[in-house]
């Protein structure tokens, strides 16, 4: 399956730093929001049948490709890369809506956790199957 949109938003004036571009912390916020969209997409949303299981960020690699300035609208397109027993890896690409340029790429490794026990657990079979179906052959 091709990439799916997991975030869309506009750079706000208060997100700029003294260098005049969007500060790194706001990229991370958008990555976090995109992660929640991934959970919804694969069946681990807050109201899912899988109860108190969720994805937790384990590792991220981020490459900043282009500065973002006030008023620019971006979207994050996500691609599922691998699905393991307890974890999955996906890629985020932040695209500037106006011209289609790439602003940021991130590779994310997330682990499934039991929110009550606070430890990693196996991905539910149905969730793993849904995630695997999102991998672009």
Image (spheres, rainbow, N blue to C red):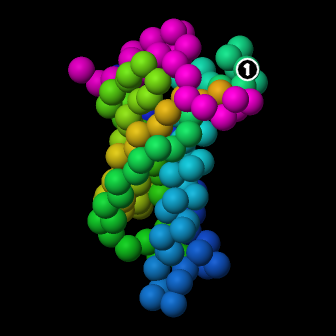
One can see residue 54 in this view: no
Locate residue 105, reporting x and y percent: 34, 54
Q: For residue 1, which quarter of the picture?
A: top left
Q: Residue furthest left?
A: 137
Q: Is residue 51 left or right of residue 26?
A: right
Helix, strand or loop status at disc 1: loop
Locate residue 65, reporting x and y percent: 29, 65
Locate residue 24, reporting x and y percent: 48, 70
Q: Is residue 38 above or below residue 129?
A: below
Q: Residue at x 47, y 16 (%)?
A: 128
Q: Which residues are magenta?
A: 115-137
Q: Is residue 41 above or below residue 96?
A: above
Instruction: Give the total of numbered labels.
Output: 1
Q: Residues within 10 Å of mark 1 (few under 14, many from 20)?
A: few
The residue tagged 1 is: 51
Locate residue 16, reporting x and y percent: 55, 80
Q: Is residue 70 left or right of residue 102?
A: right
Q: Where, quadrant-wise, is the C terminus in this rendering?
A: top left
Q: Nearer the viewer, residue 24 or 109?
A: 109
Q: Nearer the viewer, residue 128 or 134?
A: 128
One can see residue 126 in this view: yes
Say if the magenta span includes residue 89. no
Q: For residue 53, which quarter of the picture?
A: top right
Q: Residue at x 51, y 90 (%)?
A: 18
Q: Residue at x 61, y 79 (%)?
A: 13
Q: Residue at x 52, y 59 (%)?
A: 28
Q: Is residue 65 above or below residue 2?
A: below
Q: Is residue 40 left or right of residue 80?
A: right
Q: Nearer the viewer, residue 87 or 100?
A: 87
Q: Is residue 47 left or right of residue 56?
A: right
């Amino acid at each position: 399956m091709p990439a799916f949109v997991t975030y869309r938003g506009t750079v706000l004036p208060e997100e700029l730093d003294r260098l005049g571009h969007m500060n790194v912390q706001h990229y991370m916020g958008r990555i976090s929001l995109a992660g929640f969209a991934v959970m919804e997409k694969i069946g681990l949303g807050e109201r899912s049948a899988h109860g108190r299981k969720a994805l937790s960020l384990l590792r991220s690699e981020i490459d900043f490709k282009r500065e973002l300035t006030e008023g620019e609208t971006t979207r994050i397109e996500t691609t599922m890369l691998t699905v393991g027993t307890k974890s999955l890896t996906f890629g985020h690409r932040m695209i500037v809506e106006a011209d289609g340029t790439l602003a940021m790429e991130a590779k994310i490794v997330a682990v499934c956790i039991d929110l009550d026990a606070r430890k990693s657990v196996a991905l539910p079979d149905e969730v793993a199957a849904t995630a695997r179906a999102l991998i672009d052959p």
